[in-house]
Amino acid sequence: MLLNLTPPAAHGKYNLMALGAGKHVYTEKPLAATYAEGRKIMSLAAEKGLTAGCAPDTFLGGRIQTMRDLIDDGTIGSVTGAAGFAAYFGVESFHPNPAAFYQPGAGPLFDIGPYYMTALLSLLGPVRRCCAMSKRTFDTRTVTSEPRRGEIIPVNVDTYTTGILEFASGALATLLFSFDVRDSELPRMEIYGTKGTLCIPDIDPLDGPNLFGGELWLRTAESYRWNTLPRSAGAAASPWEKVPVTRPHTSTSHAENSCGIGLLDAVDAIREGRAPRASGEMALHSLEVMESMLVSAQEGRFCELETTFERPQPLPRPKA
């Protein structure tokens, strides 16, 4: 199996070369820089009888897997909607070589978006249609990190994209991916059900489905109560319940890094004759959704999705 860790713009080229040489592939996200190239990859994999897997695999971490447990158990009832927000002021303040993040195949939608998209797809299944608006706020960015401080880099991708997804299940999701926001107190991701809400809280600007660990909050119809103080005294809702993250491969620590779960699962999948959980089919669907959001923004219309995938099975629960 080839592990492809090349820059996003090169993913398609090397994935196709590896498959053409008879090798299984597990690639960094996104699957390819374009949906058309992604389709070629999956078509060649099917033709050759090979496996194509794709990051991100953070949805296999303890926090998202615990969310999956609570959804499947009916703890929050039927899922009606979701929200995902990744909004901060770019990568040029902390990344040593940020130029590639502002070129095709990257930008906030294709760089940070796959973490949120894959988490939502793994929890809620395929998307039926989407719409979006998008723009490029700055034509250039000034690097403030070392060693390229002061370097001016061109921006060749949109840096503020907001959209709505309609899932085949009927759930609706609101999304925002931006490198143009100085600060925000928005939650990073929430899932809304008829009986409750799951929340990945706003612990720090980069907290979200791009991490394996971290806190998970729950509020149900039973636990949600407004206190009895008068409004003028500062009435507030009951506090969130912090859900223990007991799944393997991660803890509630932000420092926990279980990168490689998806690759190991893909190797096991080949041995067991099944599809990997971080599958190429889900990655292709994610890529189509993201590209369709840009098409919607450019053409001012809803986009119907062509692809679909099987919602991945959760990882086995720990034995009691």
Image (cartoon, helix red, strand yellow):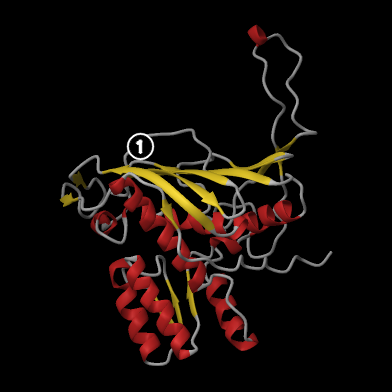
Judge left or right: residue 1 versus residue 32: right
**Residue at the outermost bottom position:** 22
Judge left or right: residue 149 versus residue 166: left
* Residue 141 image offset from top left, x and y in percent: 20, 45
* Residue 318 image offset from top left, x and y in percent: 76, 66
The number of numbered discs placed on residues in the rendered structure image is: 1
* Residue 183 image offset from top left, x and y in percent: 40, 34
Judge left or right: residue 59 versus residue 227: left
Quadrant in which the C terminus appears: bottom right
Q: Name the residue under label 1.
A: 181
**Can residue 108 be seen by looking at this rendering?**
no
**Residue at the outermost right position:** 320
User: Element type at marker 1?
Assistant: loop
The amino acid type found where label 1 is placed reads Val
Give the residue drawn at x 59%, y 60%: 122
Give the residue drawn at x 49%, y 35%: 186
* Residue 277 image offset from top left, x and y in percent: 59, 71
Badge 1: few (under 14), some or many (20 or more) residues near its Cα, within 10 Å? some
Displayed quadrant of residue 66: bottom right
Give the residue drawn at x 56%, y 65%: 258
Give the residue drawn at x 44%, y 68%: 284
Q: In this view, does 237 lie above or below 265?
A: above
Viewer-side residue, 241 vs 137: 137
Q: In this view, does 117 lie above or below 30?
A: above
Q: Is residue 8 above or below residue 188?
A: below
Viewer-side residue, 251 vs 285: 285
Q: In this view, does 40 lie above or below 283?
A: below
**Can residue 318 be seen by looking at this rendering?**
yes
